[in-house]
Image (cartoon, rainbow, N blue to C red):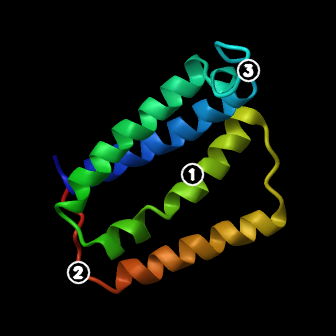
Amino acid sequence: MTNLLLILATMTCTVTGNLLLKLGANQNGFGATWPFSMINLNVILGASSFGLGLLFYTMLLKQLPLNIAQAIFSIQFVLVILASAFFFGEQIGWVRWGGIALVASGLLVIAWSFEPVIKV
């Protein structure tokens, strides 16, 4: 699997996992006592999505140095913010847009600082 596909798969799983956990956090669980009161289908699916993303990320770490992989995956923070606005109607204020711009700027600096490692 190419590095680009592994990156996309990992980010998709991570963003999906976050969205599912948010949905699950607002629902009743299977039981009346903790931790069962927090476990429901969305929480299970969200955790499973994170687990699958972990496998893809581990595969990617065989191909990339950790410092590069981690820098690339900082875009996840932006994607989760955008997904929460789209799916849940959460507001993105100007301060958050400023943070998104800083993350994007940092990614550009990192991208220019090393040889291409994303094989298509």
Residue 27: mark in rendering:
3
Q: CA distance from mark 2 to mark 3?
A: 46 Å
Quadrant location of residue 84? top right
Nearer-the-camera pick, 27 or 6: 27
Eye-nearest disc, 2 or 3: 3
Q: Amino acid at mark 3?
A: Gln
Q: Amino acid at mark 1?
A: Leu
Q: Secondary structure at mark 2?
A: loop
Nearer-the-camera pick, 43 or 5: 43
Residue 20 in the figure: left or right of residue 53 = right
Query: What residue sits 58% from the left and 72% below the top?
Result: 103
Taking 74 as reference, is 112 above or below it?
below
Residue 103: mark in rendering:
none
* Number of other residues with Cα within 10 Å of mark 3, as a class: few under 14, some 14 to 19, many 20 or more: some
Residue 120 percent location from the top left of the image: 20, 56
Circle 1 sits on which residue?
79
Pointers 2 and 3 in contact (CB under 8 A)? no
Residue 25 percent location from the top left of the image: 70, 30
Circle 2 sits on which residue?
115
Residue 57 in the figure: left or right of residue 80 = left
Q: Secondary structure at mark 3?
A: loop
